[in-house]
Amino acid sequence: MAKFIRLATGFFLAGLSGLAYGIPALQLNIEGGFYDTTDETIVTADDVFTLDAFAWANKFSIDDDQPVYLAVAITPKQENNLPDIGSFVIDGTSYSISDLIFGTPPIENGEAIFDGGDLGQHGIFDTYFLELEFFFDAAMTVAAFNTQDDAGKIPTPATGDPKDLMYMAQFEIDTSGLLEGFELHFDLYNTHVKNSKNCTSVDDCDFDIDDFAPFSHDAGTVSVPEPHNLALLGMGLLILGSVSLKRRSAYSVQ
């Protein structure tokens, strides 16, 4: 019996360790959002929201794994030569179609032509996107959690053992200026230079994705019906209900 208890305890602890080490190096979260099981993405229907970017301190080196990139993509997937999207705002800066590039991240030599080392297209790319470079602050740490399981939660500031912490960067997003029919999708990644010995300058290097937020830990926005559309839907349902009631009444009279 004692042996069985020890074995069971060992499996239990191994399970906990598996959960801990199953936390991705990079993750995204939308505060107040929810996990959409259909798209396997953390989403929000709000026009204004806070996007959290996380790097697990146990897997991500502030010194070695910088810089980091946030790709802000236009969805649904678009064709090239899109004339207009309206605009969206990130941390007070407004972006329109002229600020975006068409293709698949990362941007290399001013282009975003997909190759095997790039971010997986996962039904989003090729499309228009903005690539923002940023750096995590070693002093800005929060308690570690798995955003797929804890989507929408507000991060808790914390310090201590790196295995229990995440570095965090936050972005204030406003999508109210987007034209109807457009949404945003967010991906998080860093890069490394492929075949660095063969490139003499940044302009002729091939950059591949290194760490990235798994596609079950990325984020996006979703549309909700406009109030007038909801009203029309309600009127339509009332009319259908009235017609159905009249038909039942007619049949009962016969």
Image (tube, rainbow, N blue to C red):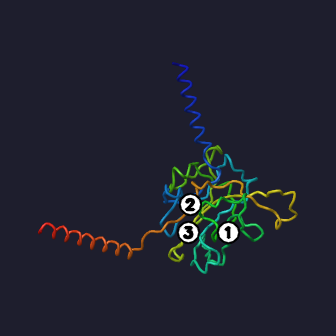
In the rendering, at what x and y percent does residue 134 appear?
69, 63
Horizontal and vertical percent position of residue 219: 56, 60
Task: Tell us which disc is closer to us: 1 or 2.
Answer: 1
Name the residue beneath numbered marker 3. 76
Circle 1 is placed at which residue position? 103
Q: Which residue is more in the foreground, 168 or 23?
A: 23
Nearer the observer, 62 or 191: 191
Query: Residue at the top extreme?
Result: 1
Q: Residue at x 51, y 69 (%)?
A: 48
Q: Position of residue 108 (x, y in %)?
A: 76, 66
**Kind of element beneath mark 3:** loop
Chain-order first, disc 1 or disc 3: 3
Residue 121 is marked as none
Give neighbour class at mark 3: few <14, some 14-19, many 20+ (Cα, 10 Å). Answer: some
What residue is disc 2 on?
219
Q: Is residue 130 left or right of residue 174?
A: right
Q: Is residue 135 above or below residue 48?
A: above
The image quadrant of residue 140 is: bottom right
Q: Nearer the viewer, mark 3 or mark 2?
A: 3
How far separated are the C-alphas under marks 1 and 3? 14 Å
- Residue 124's spot in the image, x, y percent? 60, 64
Q: Is residue 41 left or right of residue 209?
A: left
